Image: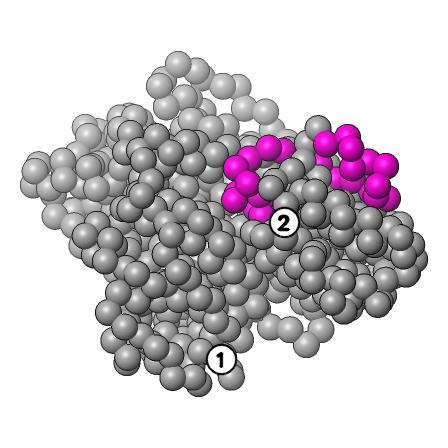
Amino acid sequence: MCGIVGYVGFQRALPILMQGLKRLEYRGYDSAGLVLVEKDGLVCEKCVGKIACLEEQILGKEYMATEGIAHTRWATHGEPSVINAHPHMDSKDKIALVHNGIIENYRALKAFLENRGHRFKTQTDTEVLVQLIEEYYEGDLTEAVRIALSQVEGTYGIVVIASHEPGKLVAARQGSPLVVGNGNGENFVASDMSAVLEYTKRAVYLEEGEIATVTPENFEITNVDRSLLRTPQIEEISWTLDQIEKGGYEHFMQKEIHEQPATLRNAIRGRLNFEEGIPRLNGLNLQYDQLRKINRVIITACGTSWHSALIGEYVIEELARIPVEVEYASEFRYRSPIIEDGTLLFVISQSGETADTLAALREARKKGATVLGICNVVGSSIARETDGGVYIHAGPEIGVASTKAFTSQVMVLYEIAILLARMRRMSLGEGAALLNYLEKIPNQVEEILQTEDRIKRIAEQYFRNNNFLYLGRGVNYPAALEGALKLKEISYIHAEGYPAAEMKHGPIALIDENMPVVVIALKDFVYDKVLSNIAEVEARNGKIIALASEGDTEIVDKVSEVIYIPHTHPLFTPILASIPLQLLAYHIAVLRGCHIDQPRNLAKSVTVE
Ligand code: G6P
């Protein structure tokens, strides 16, 4: 998510840090900042916006420090602002820290520190960490970091400096990657090697739970629990800068598809309360009795976010028994929507800036609706203007075709549906069982991603076709729509998604041997009906690519290709079904030589009508 770079050596740190930040800007860019260890103490420069703003701010400043840390932020807690930008400092401005990740127990730590007399200036989870280090500091920065981290739950990649220990960076990793770049008489720490590749190709990747103490001449790696002193394995990097930014993948879209086990974990981290069988979604800002009074839900969104809304409709109705309507934001804003007491409106937007969705939200608020947001970008316009909401925490999505944001939106909608259901008819046991299914999904996505080679081979057989049909039923009908949209967006192949049974009312006329039909045919209560739809396609020589439930051998003879999906609750299958559909679209588009990350005519964020 955020980008981190640190330097300790003999050169001026400022230009090195700035160059590093520019290289890391693709990871997030809502604000940026740096701290340098100058002769008379730490100096800090921060600003909101892209790295160019920080560059303007420091223009002409002759900082001579040879040590410093810098950060480009992708907000998770606290909106993008100068005060919330990293680095964060302790109360005496002697210790500074940059952080990538989420501190789950920051509320408890903050309460503890406030009792000890600490005062907080920001809304971030990160400030807790630097004040915790201050609390335990007794002359040894590495030791203070170690003690502080032993109390932290969550994920972090951090780099810390202290004015009273110049010439030393302390870095630690748990869940957020960090690498030490080893130079001659100088060392670097970064969230990825692209930040420092101009200066060194010698990399030492930190493992989970490790702390590195880095000086100009040396670096020492120990474990958070002090159990291990590792002899660092230096790797010589042969990748290009471009390859590194994409994590070794060909395109950002492919990287983002592969990030989904991690992004889905972020969407549930700290939120699954098994004891009560209720997801913790504090950002909704609604009390349980207010949630109980809701008798109608409207969800509005555009594009891929609209598809996740449709999945939300099935799941909220089924689990919570509340009527749900889904509207395109562009339609909703110009109608005179009926908003009554008890109507709750959700707006879903990855960017939080889509013009139609924002206008729909404003229209609904004018009519007195309570509006909640499901957004990725913290502090975005939609996130700011809603009454509350849930962040999906998927990190920056760069590929124009949305992948990881979609599955995280769906995951959050599952959490919302279970919460609403638990306020009504669902028992603790049922709630806990559903949370259990949710917890398993990231690992199941990982399993599916391992079948990428097989999906690529399927793509090789079908990429020359110019029309595709996608069929699904029930909660997987929106997954079929999303599968078709992915293919359309990046390969420019005409693709339509349809509820499987509707096929016979029109699209069946198009089916012949040149029209591959992708069918989501999982073992649920409409499985037999989908098999009948498959037979209808087969009878017309259509080629069928089926997504089937693991262990379903019956389907093999009836279709041309089978991709298996692991078992989960029937309502939760769309996340799993979407992964092979994303990969299929991706590989078909690659084989057709398309511009994967910037497809023609499309924009990542549509801020015009
Ligand atoms: C654009 C993007 C789509 C996205 C849609 C809605 O069309 O290309 O990928 O689904 O906008 O964007 P939002 O940021 O509101 O989710």
Q: Position of residue 231 (x, y in %)?
A: 53, 19
For the residue marked with disc 2, what is the amino acid? Ser
Label 1 secondary element = helix
- On whether residue 89 falls in the magenta region, the answer is no
In the rendered view, does 150 fall on the left or right side of 411? left
Q: Is residue 535 visible?
A: yes
Q: Does mark 1 have its CB less than 8 Å from ligand 1?
A: no
- On whether residue 573 falls in the magenta region, the answer is yes
The residue under label 2 is 578
Q: Name the residue rendered at 47%, 47% in the picture.
A: 411
Give me the C-alpha separation between circle 2 and circle 1.
26 Å
Compared to 68, does 84 lie above or below? below
Compared to 491, does 556 lie above or below? above
Mark 2 or mark 1: name the one nearer the start of the chain: 1
The residue under label 1 is 331
Local packing at callout 2 (Cα closer than 10 Å; few below 14, some 14-19, many 20+) is many
Local packing at callout 1 (Cα closer than 10 Å; few below 14, some 14-19, many 20+) is some
Label 2 secondary element = helix
In the rendered view, does 208 fall on the left or right side of 404? left
Q: Name the residue rendered at 58%, 52% in the picture.
A: 474
- Magenta stretch in the rendered image: 552-577
